[in-house]
Image (cartoon, grey):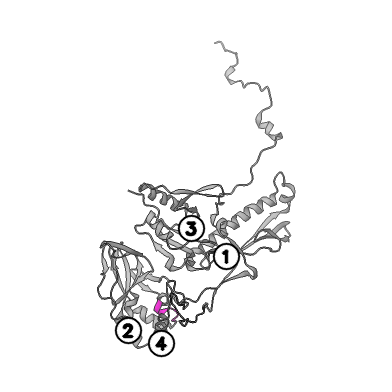
Amino acid sequence: MTVDSTPDVRLELPRQSSLGTAAARNLAHTTKSAPQMQEISSRWLLRMLPWVETKGGAYRVNRRLSYTVGDGTVEFVQDGADVRVIPRELGELALLRGFDDLDVLTAIADRCVQREFRAGETLVERGTPADKLHLIAHGRINQTSVGSYGDEVVLDVLADGDRFGEHALLDEDARWENTATAETSGTLLTLSRADFAAVQSHAASLRAHLDTFASLSQRRQNHRGEAEIAMSAGHVGEQELPGAFVDYELKPREYELSVAQTILRIHTRVADLYNGPMNQTEEQLRLTIEALRERQEHELINNREFGLLHNADFKQRIQTHSGPPTPDDMDELLCRRRGTKFFLAHPRTIAAIGREFNARGIYPDHADLGGQQVPAWRGVPILPCNKIPVTEEKTSSILAMRTGEENQGVIGLHQTGLPDEYEPGLSVRFMGLDEKAITSYLVTTYYSAAILVPDAVGVMENVQIARWPR
């Protein structure tokens, strides 16, 4: 048997004739990017708000005295299928605003009767006697009436927390001015005039409060609910002119600056040895400040004390007529204030706006903001803000606002000239070294937002963003 001793050339590796790239990289400089961060957004709200210097840490909004009260929504508690109104929430009714006798409010709440309704059901008919207050716990209800040309027109859309029929509790001759039809199924609580009168007959404090309410209601007001300034116009001769003065709110609202803070920690060995080509301390500060600004914008939208969503006047909140944001809904939101500067919406809401417009053959125009093209409606920019919440039911909100002190709009509040100021209104303060050789910096920013008059901000609520046009 002969053995072939010829080597298998297929197993031989090719001889290397030059330096390989893997070894060469050990001697080469690497081109590096600055640290990246996904959280950074466009932050249009921070860019578009005019910022007002707030010395003393507070900003007081003085307004004319207004008699318009009780415009808030009513909240409920749910125990299984049973729904009850929270007694103190009845203070959101105009005739009960400022009334704080909890025992009486509880007695009124106990007389509210739960009622379920189905989609398409007519709850009240225009022209029929009105003898009940209706509190909407859940669902959507259309209020309709006869238009100028005899057709049925939708006047308003009511939803969770709204109510109608409040005038029926005190007026025995009251009649329904509009027809209320359920757009969806839902739940409401009703309070009859008879039940309200029964509570009133046993509560002297309630009778005294209602007398005060009646006297306030008789005072002359303008269409905004402000105390009217008496004047004469169109007269001739030497007519005696009425005397007048402008009354102010006795307890104007004050906005205190809120704070966002964090402590940035950097080991001295990192700062000393690994500082090139990028300064580690500067990069850590940059990313920390970006996160702080993102939180600042989130608070300006969502904070319960001063956030725009929670502090928008209830008369400036509207509902969509069918769910998705249609051109008609955008017009309804736009027409409620003069000089709207911009719309603010979640990016997914802006996509839903585009779908609804395209389905109708309408294509929004664009506006130029600092060289950047953004979508617009009626010339008003529609700006993205991912801080506006999207619910599990895929609904969101759209804000429209007027800005600036001179326009009686929305303003941002901050204070500059802080110790160790790093950016306007933001300070980076050295806190020292600890026993582990870690350097600490306190990063702080102070801010808030103020709505100077109620119509400066409008909100379209419960905007459906998941439904595709058919």
Q: Earlier in the sequence, mark 3 or mark 1?
A: 3
Residue drawn at (52%, 73%), measured in percent from left and top? 63
Q: Which element type, helix, strand or loop, lies under badge 2?
A: helix
Quick one: 112 or 146, which is closer to the camera?
146
Residue 96 falls within the magenta-colored stretch: yes
Residue 230 in the image: state x and y as whole percent. 46, 78
Q: Quadrant of residue 105?
A: bottom left
Residue 412 point in image, percent of width and height: 57, 63
Q: CA distance from mark 1 to mark 2?
A: 44 Å
Q: Quadrant of the N terminus?
A: top right
Q: Amino acid at mark 1?
A: Ser
Disc 2/disc 3 C-alpha distance (Å): 43 Å
What amino acid does circle 4 point to?
Answer: Ala
The answer to whether any part of residue 119 appears in the image is no
Gap in angstroms between the C-alphas marked 4 and 1: 39 Å
- Point out which mark residue 388 bears: 3
Pick whichever, 95 or 35, lies toward us. 95
- Callout in the foreground (3, 4): 4
Q: CA distance from mark 3 to mark 1?
A: 17 Å
How far is the residue under mark 4 from the one under mark 2? 14 Å
Q: Which residue is mark 1?
A: 448
| Residue labelled with disc 2 | 197
> Which of 114 and 405 lies nearest the eye of the viewer?
405
Could you tell me the amino acid type at mark 2? Ala
Instruction: For the residues labelled 1 and 2, say whether their Cβ atoms are less than 8 Å apart.
Output: no
Q: Quadrant location of residue 48?
A: bottom right
Q: Residue furthest front?
A: 237
Q: In this figure, which residue is indicated by the disc labeled 4?
A: 208
Please tell me whether mark 4 or mark 2 is closer to you in this view: 4
Where are the magenta residues, as a range? Answer: 94-99
